[in-house]
Image (cartoon, helix red, strand yellow):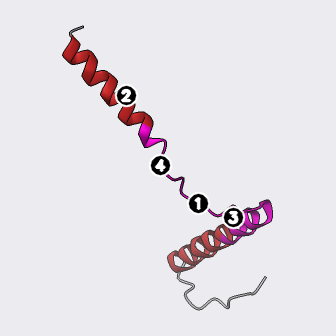
Amino acid sequence: MSRHTFARSVIRAFGEMLDFAGPVKSYPVANADEITRAAWAETGRAMRGAMKQVDEQLRYPHRAPTNH
């Protein structure tokens, strides 16, 4: 390995190490209840969408919505 190539490798490695030295982004932490609530809400939205699609395919556009 030539000196020039070795020097470039060392400089690149040093630069990559400095990338880790930057400030860490703060992310909000969710607890298990929030995750569960969000997952069930998304499941409900998906099920309502699927049921609406089936109703439209079976030509029941005015089916009375129920609140469960």
Which numbered circle lies on residue 39?
A: 3
Q: CA distance from mark 4 to mark 3?
A: 33 Å
Q: Earlier in the sequence, mark 2 or mark 3?
A: 2
Q: Earlier in the sequence, mark 4 or mark 2?
A: 2
Query: Of circles 3 and 1, which is in front?
Result: 1
Badge 3 crowding class, 10 Å Cα cut-off, few under 14, some 14 to 19, many 20 or more, is few
Residue shown at 53%/82% (left/top)?
A: 59
Residue labelled with disc 2: 13
Asked where in the image residue 10 lies, by quadrant, the reply is top left
Check disc 1 and give the amino acid type: Ser
Q: Secondary structure at mark 3?
A: helix
Residues at marks 4 and 2 touching, judged by CB atoms closer than 8 Å: no
Residues at marks 2 and 1 touching, judged by CB atoms closer than 8 Å: no
Residue 63 screen position, x and y as percent: 63, 88
Query: Of circles 4 and 3, which is in front?
Result: 4
Badge 1 crowding class, 10 Å Cα cut-off, few under 14, some 14 to 19, many 20 or more, is few
